[in-house]
Amino acid sequence: MVSGTLARYFGKRFISSVVGSFIGVIVLGAMIDYVELMRRGADWPNATPWLLAQISMYRVPALTERIMPFSVLVGTMSCYLNLSRRLELVIARAAGVSAWQFVMPAVLGAVLFGAVATTIYNPISATLQERSKRLESEVVGEVPSALQESTSGFWVRQKSADGAAIINAKTSQQQGATLGTVSVYTFDAEGHFEQRIEARSAALKDGYWQLDDVRIYEAGKPLLIEDSHRLKTNLTLEQVRESFATPETVPFWQLPSYITMADRAGLRAAGYRLQYDQLLARPFQLAAMVLLACSVSLRFFRFGGVQKMVLSGVSAGFLLFVLQKITEDMSKSELLSPIAAAWTPVLVGGLTGFVALLFQEDG
């Protein structure tokens, strides 16, 4: 009974500390992102403080989702350092409770927190991320952002009865259903270049692209300007989404269908597989962060060296983040399978924290 009561108490303390840390990260991320948007939005024709605040609010969940493991790391260290400072860990040890018994509630709490983040928080953040992109493109108007000018945008290739076409778009909305600043290069059935079509926007309809504000360039013919133009296509919305939808804007529950559609169409699905495997591994990643934090925060407070413990915990979390970025890049370059890329940082972090705790508590 005593052990169960202590477990519930430690679990509540852990959850409250992690939630407080995560809320602090959200507030800090919102402030930084809003200031950055204010700086970028100085040249946007339709920007207002309220619209920029809306864009920032929609973007913050996706930003904080990526640094969620650091919130758990900091929240766990704060929780157990406070318990040690108030001598509650000393009393628990004196009562015969081992370190593994008051670490386990935090591990289970982290798994629960990660499961909620994957199944509930991620679909919300993905939807809001897509909405932020749509609102940002409306605010930008006709003036492309610095990011759009410095990148080649999105590319997709299609074939129809009239021949082939290569479509490039600077912006994408509704996961590829609507494109902005479009360039189309058309080829005949023999593969010879025919036309270059420039359009302000393109919308995917049933069997064709609806192009607006069109300029058509063809060798040996004068420039042709049209208000609208239809470009035949055999692409479906699902196939277009595979080319224009980024994995971060696809909710967790829709990722399996995206992967299946990509495999059927013969398209690359490494990014979606990696995103899906990372979301599946998130509960265990947060549990690994708890083990890392506990390995540096269970020392008696009166022994000193708190600053060194906190620094070592933050350094371990940073190194784990670097490892995760490396495995992500290797997976996107098809040098590592998505499963290995998603689970390698989890295993490294979890085993490191477990071995450190085992050495400290059991010699």
Image (cartoon, rainbow, N blue to C red):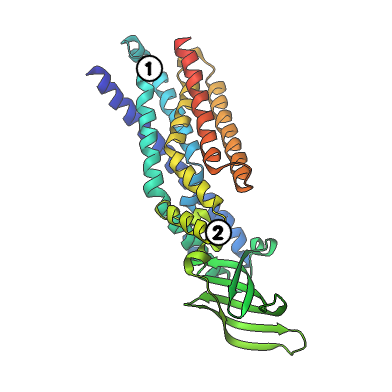
Mark nearer the viewer, 2 or 1: 2
For label 2, the SS is: loop
Residue 118, position in %: x, y? 41, 45
Residue under the image location 60 percent in, 41 percent down: 336
Residue at screen point 70% across, 75% down: 191
Residues at marks 2 and 1, CA–CA distance in whole angstroms: 56 Å
From the viewer's perspective, tell me whether residue 78 is left or right of residue 145.
left
> Can see residue 57?
no
Q: Mark 2 touching mark 1, by CB under 8 A? A: no
Could you tell me how many numbered marks the image carries?
2
Residue at the (43%, 52%) spot, across then down: 256
- Position of residue 244 relative to residue 298, above or below, is below
Q: Position of residue 282 (x, y in %)?
A: 45, 39
Q: Position of residue 146 (x, y in %)?
A: 66, 62
Q: Residue at x 47, y 35 (%)?
A: 285
Q: Which mark is residue 223?
A: none
- Work out whether residue 283 or residue 220 is closer to the camera in this orientation and state it: 220
Along the line of sight, which residue is nearer the eye, 192 or 96?
192
Kindly identify which numbered label has been placed on residue 266. Answer: 2
Q: Is residue 291 left or right of residue 157?
A: left
Question: Disc 1 designates what residue?
Answer: 89
Query: Image height check: is 91 above or below 325?
Result: above
- Can you tell which quarter of the image residue 41 is in? bottom right
Q: Where 40 falls versus 72 (above or below)? A: below
| Three-letter code for the amino acid on which mark 2 is drawn | Gly
Outermost residue to the front: 190
